Amino acid sequence: MKLPEPVMNAGRTAIRGWGMATAAFRPDPDFLLIGAKRGGSTSFYFALLEHPRVIPLFPAAGLLPKANHTKGVHYFDSNYARGMRWYRSHLPSRSSRARAGRRAGGPVVAGEGSPYYLHHPLAAERAAGNVPKARILLVLRDPVERTFSHYRERVRAGAETLTFEEALAAEESRTSGEEAKIIADPAYLSYAHEQQSYVAQSEYARCLERWFAHYPRDRFHILTSEDFYRDPQAACDRAAEFLGLPPAPLPAAGKVWNAAAPGDIPDDVRKRLARHFAPHNRRLEEMLGRRLSDWTAG
């Protein structure tokens, strides 16, 4: 039976209040999953949660079914004004970590996944200043496909009325000056910068350079969604090793979250996007020291 919304709201407020009251006993996250939006980060995050030594955010552990677990806090992008006590209120406590570690047979890790972190101009600096020891996970998807998936998500949400080609043409005017406003006023929240930046959020090299400027490169583990969906178990094993964990069989690692029925990109639009992203992809390959052969060639 579903509880009335006022009761649900009161419960959420009480839980968050308890989390903030005990914030001093809640360690920093072990990892941040910083994106990319519509890149497969949700499926990857919940696959990692299948590992017995990766535990969810508070209050999910032991209180909520897995389907209701929280993935991201959006602290370093949209909620930074709430302060670190609010942020820590979402993290598992030392005592809950210890209990989970005893059950799992070894130390556990916890982290959060907020896919706007990659694109937000201040998120990397904020994260490095507050959780400098965090390891950084990143899932990247063919930028042409990610761009289209991002657009279709907005259409499904009833927030985008333009055609795909019209939305691409409108992106520059919609987002012009928004990044500068965010930097000038850290309390400023930009819908256009987060939700209508279809192409810009697929220019990964530019976004990733900000994160590389604030964290050592050996603290990054970057995979493609194509590799993850091809072999979820192997991808999660490599991520577990990066997090200092042994491999573990993950029965639900192949489950796809936030899936959408495939759509067709007009051939001329696909080719135009591929040409646009080609230099960005080459720059990314140089930064990562590896080829991204599964992606649309420009």
Image: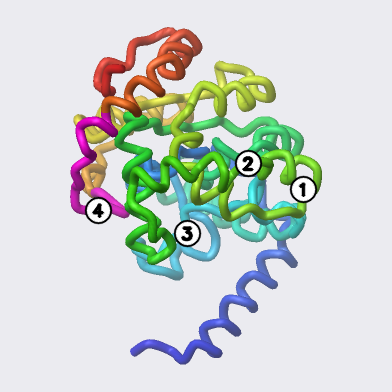
Distance between mark 1 and mark 2 Cα atoms: 17 Å
Which residue is disc 1 drawn over? 186
Sort mark 4 into few (<14), some (14-19) or many (20+) by Cα contacts within 10 Å: few
Sort mark 1 into few (<14), some (14-19) or many (20+) by Cα contacts within 10 Å: some
Which residue is disc 2 drawn over? 176
Q: Do tag 4 and tag 3 residues touch (Cβ < 8 Å)? A: no
Question: Which secondary structure class fits the magenta region best?
Answer: loop
- Residue 211 seen in render: yes
3 or 1: tag closer to the N-terminus: 3
Which residue is disc 4 drawn over? 260
Label 3, secondary structure: give it.
loop
Horizontal side of residue 121 vs 228, given as left or right: right
Range of residues picked out in magenta: 256-270
Label 4, secondary structure: give it.
loop
Which residue is disc 3 drawn over? 70
2 or 4: tag closer to the N-terminus: 2
Q: Nearer the viewer, mark 3 or mark 1?
A: 1
Q: Which amino acid does label 2 sit on?
A: Ser
Q: Which amino acid does label 3 sit on?
A: Thr
Outermost right residue: 184
Residue depicted at x 57% and y 17%: 217
Distance between mark 4 and mark 1 Cα atoms: 33 Å
Give percent across and percent down for residue 58.
55, 61
Which quadrant holds residue 161?
Answer: bottom left
Give percent across and percent down for residue 132.
70, 31
The N terminus is located in which quarter?
bottom left
Label 2, secondary structure: give it.
loop
- Residue 51 seen in render: no
Horizontal side of residue 225 vs 287, given as left or right: left
Q: What residue type is labelled 1?
A: Pro
Give percent across and percent down for residue 38.
38, 44
Distance between mark 3 and mark 2 Cα atoms: 32 Å
